[in-house]
Amino acid sequence: MSCIEARNLRKVYGSTVALDHVDLTIAEGRIVGLIGPNGAGKTTALNALLGLIPYSGTLRVLGRDPWTERGDLVRDIAFIADTAVLPRWIRVSDLLDYVEGVHPHFDRVKATAFLAKTNIGKSSKVRDLSKGMVAQLHLALVMAIDAKLLILDEPTLGLDILYRKQFYDSLLNDYFDHNRTILVTTHQVEEIQDVLTDFVFIDRGRITLHCSMDELETRYTELMVNPDNASAARTLGPIQERQLFSRNVFLYDGIDRQRLARLGEVRTPRIADLFIAMMSKEQEVAR
Amino acid sequence: MITRVMQWSVRREIWENRSIYIAPLCTALLYLFGFMLSRLSPHRIGVQRPFDAAAVILIATAFIVAIFYCVDAMQSERRDRSILFWKSLPVSDRTTVLAKVSIPMVVIPAITFATVVTLQIAMLLWSTTWINVFFHALILLYGLIVMSLWFAPIYAWLLMVSAWAKRAVVLWAVLPWMIAGMLERLIFGTSLFGFWMKQCFMGFMEAAFETTKQGQVERLDQLRPGNFLITPGLWTGLIVAALFLWAAVKLRRGREPI
């Protein structure tokens, strides 16, 4: 069964089309990055998945309609928005009590064990914790929830690099197994590239690319050549060209890697570079 | 399961709004302090009927606390974005709204009852006159239940506006009624609306008690629960309250942080 299935998903706010006929299928056990510029519709998409907003079209999350069956669905989903959503007035121990009280799939022992590794005091209030600690606290809660789908919306926003690294390490080592699905949006694409199994580009409410990491390796190639080979490289139809330290870097879609290797150095592109390439192409088309 | 979630939801409201018990506690302590001072003074100054005054002051405090609570209850979680956290947990909007309305209708009256009875017992230790605390407590309990039911539409209205308005909840809650009252005055020259408003706040006295000329309740036979239960105003009020709460649930369903 696929974890998320969207057909013709559409959401309009006034005259702004936030999601424009989105079709998307995400299988169980994947770690998917949802990547797009500001205002692309990422948060709207997540809100629809979480049953927080109504939409048109069909959407199934874990086999359920998030808007009409939100009550049942929410037990199997864990969600972290950017770190500022934990109530600031609450005490850490009260928060644990509360979540244990209301969530049938919450394992307090796990949460406590995770918190023991941090500097978070049980009796401190959320407002007295640093941003990084609040993120750790939220992660501790979520990791102790036995959810089938974890949705992370900019979970590391505003955190320093050390915390960000720790965050994803804990997520992979202590949480992820192949029965779970993780959907994450972030602007720090570089940092999660090695974590992902799939990525989805979204722009102006549309899915522009849905690709697995294996596909990225076989389909896309980045070629770095000296200026004298540049014109030869250009004839092969790169989707993007840029300059790097007086060398030319080309990005190809579906060109044989062996063939490119004769012109210069080849490697698998970074997701961020592919994203930029596709975005600038889109803009040219739009013009 | 639902009752367990309900209990935790109520508990989190109390954690968030500590004024629910701090305000009555402070008022009671201040009152007791003043009462003791008046006893020590040789001139026997102080209010008449200090035991009744204690109850009245604490009921008024409770009402103010309840109003402030309702105004903020559905808005603060959107303002501090914590609504995204609450909604990530398996607690339905209906449970949340019911937990919130139980604060002014059940929790605050219960705290008021406990505070008044404790305060009156404490005052007894310092006074020369005797009152029957049990008898007072019975009247108080009846009065608190009556007020809780009578004020239900007011609390529900405030919760609904609090769920709807992006800012200035008080303004949105009060202004439409004031404008309605003024228009009636200007167009028809009548003040039926004002009278109706007064009924909304004070009508329970007439419906539930047979007061003496001074507006006091001294005997148990002045309580008229039968009459209160057949007052149409009570039932229309409760129906309207249910509608407002239903609207608050629907509003919270589609609400995002502000």
Image: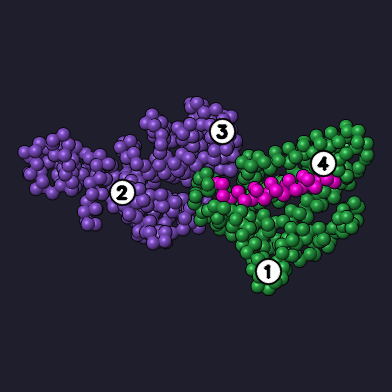
> Mark 2 Cα within 10 Å, few/some/many (few <14, many 20+)?
many
In the figure, the shade used to draw chain B is green
The chain ID associated with circle 2 is: A
Name the secondary structure under disc 1.
Answer: helix
**Numbered circle sitting on residue A94:** none
Percent x, y for residue A265? 14, 35
At label 2, which amino acid type do we have?
Phe
Q: Looking at this rendering, what residue extends furthest in the bottom direction?
A: B188
Note whether A162 is above or below A48 in the view shown: above
Percent x, y for residue A104? 56, 43
Q: Nearer the viewer, mark 1 or mark 3?
A: 1
Measure the C-alpha gap from mark 3 to mark 4: 33 Å
Scheme of image coloration: by chain
Which one is in front, A105 or A221?
Answer: A221
- Residue B231 sits in which quadrant? bottom right
Measure the C-alpha gap from mark 2 to mark 3: 38 Å
Q: Tell me which chain appears purple.
A: A
Res. B136 in view: yes
Which one is in front, A210 or B153?
Answer: B153
The chain ID associated with circle 3 is: A
Whether residue A108 sits left or right of residue B38 in the image: it is: left
**Numbered circle sitting on residue A201:** 2
Name the secondary structure under disc 4.
Answer: helix
At label 3, which amino acid type do we have?
Lys
Highlighted range, magenta: B51-77
Q: Main secondary structure of the magenta part?
A: helix
Measure the C-alpha gap from mark 2 to mark 4: 65 Å
Q: Nearer the viewer, mark 2 or mark 3?
A: 3
Look at the numbered discs 2 and 4 and tell me whether their residues touch, using CB distance below 8 Å: no
